[in-house]
Image (cartoon, helix red, strand yellow):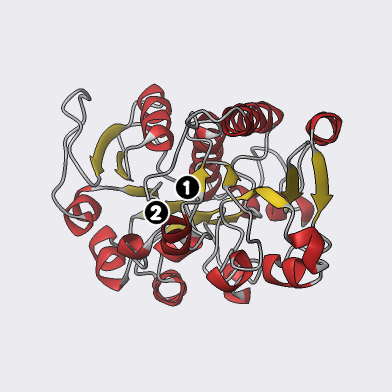
């Protein structure tokens, strides 16, 4: 008998069709996982063995408890911060993710946000739209410092952070990092704390894994250390940054600008951010490339196949 899969996040049509051809697939009626589970008839909920969803999807213990036969949760992407891992551990539910599948795509966007915020591309477009550009003989935008020679500090030197470091080096930037542990194999200097890294850096890029230990890791003290010429780029999770402190730092000139793909209370975004110069904003699209989706889906499928064959998963999350 085919195992029953609950598809709780959107996936590509080819992958969707592939799953339906091989497994019994139930699609969540709403993006709210708790509400989606509550809407399922008890007999259908009782059949579900596998859940496929983005790792940021909030899966509380109460909702998971209504899936008595659940044995595997496959996260699309590297994150798994939405899942009640303690509940999974207590029940022996295997949790997997797709580490490094979207690392290059997220790193690309990090550099795009960096360029956009440092070079103030949103204001450059507004300048054009206002008809203010009259060629070299007319009014010109004020020149800004470029990327060459800037110091880029990376918070979290995992797969995404390493790809950001490689890209930054190509822009002739100096790279340093802070993480859970040192990486002796890399040529970049390690800093013992985020404050020390921010004090050194001109640009601070956040690529931390989101969990209780990294909640508001970027706080008012870090932003103060980054300073009035510093830029913050966040492509990890919104919870890693104290958003209220960030808005205050931007409005008061405590830091120079920011590039944000993630927000503390998604999909809500503080309105003040849209009004500030040197702030680049995107709607959590770091991993939204065709290449990343294909790698994530291949990883999920490999984990499902291993699970249904009674074998260990390829990319288990430590519980």
Residue at 57% in and 69% down = 273
Where's the N terminus, which quadrant?
A: top right
Q: Does 148 sit above or below residue 4?
A: above
Please tell me in which quadrant of the rendered image residue 60 appears.
bottom right
Disc 2 and disc 1: Cα gap in Å?
A: 7 Å
Residue furthest to the front: 1
**Residues at marks 2 and 1 touching, judged by CB atoms closer than 8 Å:** yes
Element type at marker 2? strand
Residue closer to the observer: 279 or 295: 295
Q: Is residue 51 left or right of residue 112?
A: right
Q: How far from the left and from the top, in percent, is residue 248?
A: 42, 77
| Sooner in the amino-acid sequence: mark 2 or mark 1 | 1
Say if residue 307 shows up in the picture: yes
Q: Is residue 301 left or right of residue 103?
A: right
Please tell me in which quadrant of the rendered image residue 2 appears.
top right
Q: How far from the left and from the top, in percent, is residue 54?
A: 62, 50
Q: How far from the left and from the top, in percent, is residue 238?
A: 49, 62
Q: Which residue is tagged 1?
A: 118
Q: Does 33 sit above or below residue 10?
A: below
**Disc marking residue 231:** 2
Residue at 65% in and 30% down = 301
Please tell me in which quadrant of the rendered image residue 137 appears.
top right
Numbered label tally: 2
């Amino acid at each position: 008998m085919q195992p029953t899969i609950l598809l709780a996040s959107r996936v590509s049509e080819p992958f969707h069709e592939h799953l339906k051809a091989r497994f019994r697939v139930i699609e969540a009626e709403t993006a709210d996982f708790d509400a989606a589970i509550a809407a399922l008839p008890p007999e259908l909920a009782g059949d579900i063995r596998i859940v496929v969803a983005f790792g940021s999807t909030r899966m509380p213990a109460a909702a998971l408890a209504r899936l008595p036969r659940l044995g595997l949760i496959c996260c699309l992407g590297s994150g798994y911060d939405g899942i009640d891992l303690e509940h999974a551990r207590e029940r022996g539910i295997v949790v997997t993710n797709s580490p490094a599948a979207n690392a290059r795509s997220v790193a690309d966007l990090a550099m795009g946000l960096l360029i956009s915020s440092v070079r103030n591309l949103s204001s450059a477009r507004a300048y054009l739209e206002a008809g203010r550009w009259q060629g070299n003989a007319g009014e010109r935008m004020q020149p800004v410092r470029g990327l060459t020679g800037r110091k880029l500090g990376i918070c979290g030197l995992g797969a995404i952070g390493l790809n950001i470091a490689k890209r930054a080096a190509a822009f002739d930037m100096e790279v340093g990092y802070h993480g859970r542990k040192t990486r002796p194999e890399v040529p970049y200097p390690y800093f013992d704390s985020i404050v020390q890294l921010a004090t050194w850096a001109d640009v601070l890029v956040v690529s931390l894994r989101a969990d209780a230990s990294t909640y508001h890791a970027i706080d008012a003290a870090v932003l103060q250390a980054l300073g009035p010429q510093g830029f913050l780029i966040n492509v990890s999770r919104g919870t890693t940054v104290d958003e209220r402190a960030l808005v205050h730092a931007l409005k008061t000139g405590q830091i120079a600008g920011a590039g944000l793909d993630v927000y503390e209370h998604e999909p809500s975004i503080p309105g003040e951010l849209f009004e500030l110069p040197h702030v680049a904003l995107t709607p959590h699209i770091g991993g939204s490339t065709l290449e990343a989706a294909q790698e994530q889906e291949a990883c999920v499928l490999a984990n499902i196949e291993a699970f249904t064959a009674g074998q260990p998963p390829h990319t288990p999350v430590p519980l």
